[in-house]
Image (cartoon, rainbow, N blue to C red):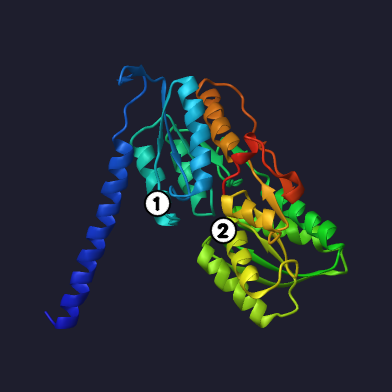
Amino acid sequence: MSRLAKLVYMAGVLSFIVSCSFTVFYGYMVLAHKPAEVKDGGIKYKYHFVLVPEEMDNEYWRLVEKGAQAAAKKYGVLLEYVGPKQANIDVHLKTIEMAAVSKVDGIMTQGLDDQFTPLINRVIEQGIPVVTVDTDTENSKRFSYIGTDNYYSGYLAGKALIADTKGHANVAIITGSFYKNHQQERVKGFKDAVKSEKGIHIIDIQESEISRVRAAEKAYQILQNHPNVNAFFGTSALDGVGIAQVVEQYKKPGQIYIISFDTLPETLEYIRKGTIQATVVQEPYEMGYGAVKLMIDLINGKKVPSIVHTDTRILRAKDLPLTRGDKAGGGK
């Protein structure tokens, strides 16, 4: 066997081992479940659900989980929160597959793009109900979606920018992803809100991959390439924070208008300081709580709405401090 052939063979073996490792690891996380109607630490559960987030180590998704766990405790549900630690479509899909293999009673997850549709359909054909949370796959057979109306939230952001800039702004958009449904909808809603305003011009659109560092890099590049930009819209929470960091470093306060998403602690601090002028507030806690209730109703044969939109609104400095309920704002 030639040296090249040996290298190709070894690379193939390594790839197989890595693939198997992911499968076994995530499979174990989900397969180590306890079926319904069993006792765990003296607690008897009626159902076993799995919540699969885009990324586990994310403040926004921790709030979704917190709401889901509160509902789970109230209604006797064993709830597992498993998925990629950081955004990874392949791991996300694999986790859903393994949850289905383990015959859980219900799966709650995002429907980030078209890759999710055939998998969700297969899971439902196996008799396991699926509820999408935060991001929908409208073309799938999912039973219900609960979360923000992402088009409307982008539209709200556009109308807020018009009001705050008196209809005159050169805007750059930094979006978490060009390909994920909820990010696309936010951009579309924003564009539709401002398209009839002659004084509003969208100068550039860049992708951050939902990374604070990448958002800051893109904001810096935009300001270098388009010095006439005087407003930004960040379609995810980390976009807004990254933009604000750059604006504070290179521009005087008030020179650049920023509208962001969600209520991360950093976002609220930037609003207090006047670096960020407004942010779109979502309700992740309510999404998680409501998803569990929808799933229980489905299992019990009740009719559930196809779409449940949670509240969305604009928050500015005058709206601070937040109430206790508002602090479930998170960041996504």
Residue in the foreground of this view, choosing between 5 and 190: 190
- Depth check: 180 or 153 in front? 153
Locate residue 327, reporting x and y percent: 61, 40
Residue highlighted by disc 2: 238
Q: How many marks?
A: 2
Is residue 262 visible in this depiction of the protein? yes
Relative to 188, is 132 on the left or the right?
left
Secondary structure under tag 1 reads: loop
State the image coordinates of residue 147 (x, y, percent, origin top left): 62, 41
Picture coordinates of residue 91, whole percent (x, y): 39, 53
Is disc 2 surrounded by few (<14), some (14 to 19) or many (20+) residues within 10 Å? many
Q: Specify few, some or many for label 1: CA neighbours under 10 Å numbering under 14, 14-19, or 20 or more.
A: some
Q: Is residue 310 left or right of residue 8?
A: right
Residue at the extreme left: 1
Closest to the camera, between mark 2 and mark 1, is: 2
- For badge 2, the amino acid type reads Leu
Which residue is at 44% across, 20% downward? 76
**What numbered label is drawn on residue 85?**
1
Residue 306 appears anywhere in the view = no
53 up-or-down from 303: above or below:
below
Would you place residue 306 above or below residue 329 in this image?
above
| Residue in the picture at 61% in, 24% down | 303
